[in-house]
Structures are given as structure tokens and as C-alpha cells.
Amino acid sequence: MIPDALSQGQFDTVYNFLSLVIASQLFTALFLLISLPRILPRYRNAITVAIIVCGIAAYHYFRIFDSFKEAFVTDALGGDGTYTQAAGASFNEGYRYVDWLLTVPLLLVELVAVLALARKVQSQLLFKLVPAAALMIILGYPGEISGDTGTRGLFGLLSTLPFLYILYVLFVQLTKSLDLQPAGVRQTLSNLRWLLLLSWGVYPIAYLLPMLNIEGANAWVGLQIGYSVADILAKAVYALIIFKVARIKSFADDAEFARVESSHDEFAAAPRTR
């Protein structure tokens, strides 16, 4: 599916979106690291996992970025702005699967950790979600690298089974746990599940494109844009919402902590006078 050539505009579009993901993941991780003291210790594990997820994503996008620049080159003397695949180099899509194998299970760990449920309940949820997430990615990879439509369809179907199981746990079994949460975070956590569904929905659509005979440079560029936007939503935006939930729950758990933090916010927002 990787095209033989890209126009100047297509190359610049992919280049800029990869840069956007790197910046989003890096600075989200930095913000969360600085903000750790602004939540209670019992919720810091969730934010620490979020920092790790964003760090892993940033690292792999650096690798994807370098792979992209090495794979597509242009003759500066030609001046026509066409980028062709360099001899002996190719764009390595496998970096994405390595990233997803690590980060997708951790995204579910974030969600369970911020709920701060009883240890037994947390263990039961993680035992269901984490292996299913890893299996979903592992089963999808053989189809991704296969040029055979039948093989791609078979492994696509197999990887869909753990995906449906994850949705069942998130939208059926996890609902019981939401009832134990403060009223202020129930809707946010419910929306968080839909964010995961929305962002993850990009991946199977992209997976199906070659089976629908949708190929060429425009399709490939669209695929890279879709993956980039989905990773920003599923990791950086998701992490910031997890942080918001942790802040709300910290305030609900400890009135004195809420008072001190609120006073800091009011001081930061107050206008400066000479």
C-alpha cells in the first residue's frame, strides 16, 4: 500500500502530522509530570502510566518520522517537488504495531487505575482487559504485513474478537464500577469510553482499505493522517481527561487538599497590579 511517489504537498502533509504527534505526546507527558503533585497520591499511578504511554508514543513517532524521511527522497536539482522511494529504504509501519502493543493495554490500565476501586476488582478488570488488548494487536499484525486479501481478512476478523470483548467489558461490566464514582466524574468517565471507541475505530477502517482496493498516494497519506489524529486522541487527549478525573476525585476525597489547590488556582488567575 506504500506509494512509489509523493507530491510535495503530500510529503509535507505527512511530515507535518508526524511532527504534530511528536509535539503532542512530548508536551502532554511534560505537563502531566509537572502536575503530579496537584492530585492525591492514590491517583498518581494512573497519571504515571499516562506519562509512560505518551513517552512511548513520542519515541516511536520519532522512529516513524525518521523512517519516513529516509524512505522518501527528492532530487533537489530536479525541482519538481516529487518524492520517490529511496533505493534500499522503506517506510517501516511496524513501529506503529510495536507502539500499540505497549500502549493499548496501558491505556486500559490508566482507566482502571484512576477509578481507584478495591484491589480485587481492579485485578479482575485488568486480567480481562490487558490480555485482550495485547491479543488484538498481535492478531492484527500478520494481516497488516500480508499482501494476500484472504490472510488479511482472516487476521482482521480474529483481531476483532478481542476488540469486541474489550468493548463488552468497558460498556457493560465497567458500568457497575461507574456507579461507585463521584457524581462529577461519572459522565466524564462514560465519555472517555466513547473517546476510546472513536479513536480506535480509525484503525480497523485503515486496515480494511487495501481489501476495498483503495490504494495510491492519496489513500496512504489519508491513512497516515488518520493514524496520527487517532493517536493524539487516544493518548494525549485521553491522558488529559484522565488527569481531569484524578483532580475531581482528589477534591472530592480531601476537602483540605481541594481548598489549598483552589487557592493556588485563584492566585494564578488573579490579575497582577503594581
Image: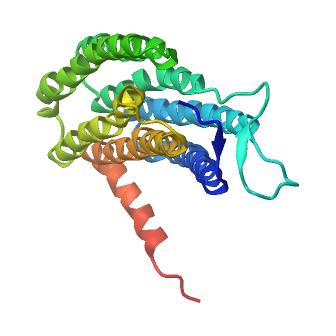
Q: Residue at x 41, y 36 (%)?
A: 214
Question: Residue at image x 30%, y 41%?
Answer: 195
Q: Which residue is most to the right?
A: 77
Instruction: Decide which of 90, 188 is in the foreground and name it.
Output: 90
Q: Is residue 125 visible?
A: no
Q: Position of residue 124 (x, y in %)?
A: 25, 11
Q: Residue 274's x, y, as percent?
A: 59, 89
For this view, does 199 lie left or right of residue 21? left
Quadrant of the rendered image containing residue 176: top left
Task: Relative to 269, say whether 206 is above or below.
Answer: above
Eyeballing the image, is 168 above or below 245? above
Q: Which quarter of the figure has residue 182?
A: top left
Report whether residue 92 is seen. yes
> Residue at (19%, 49%) from the top-left corner?
184
Residue 167 location in percent, x, y?
Answer: 22, 25
Horizontal side, residue 33 vs residue 86: left or right: left
- Along the line of sight, the residue nearer the viewer: 12 or 192: 12
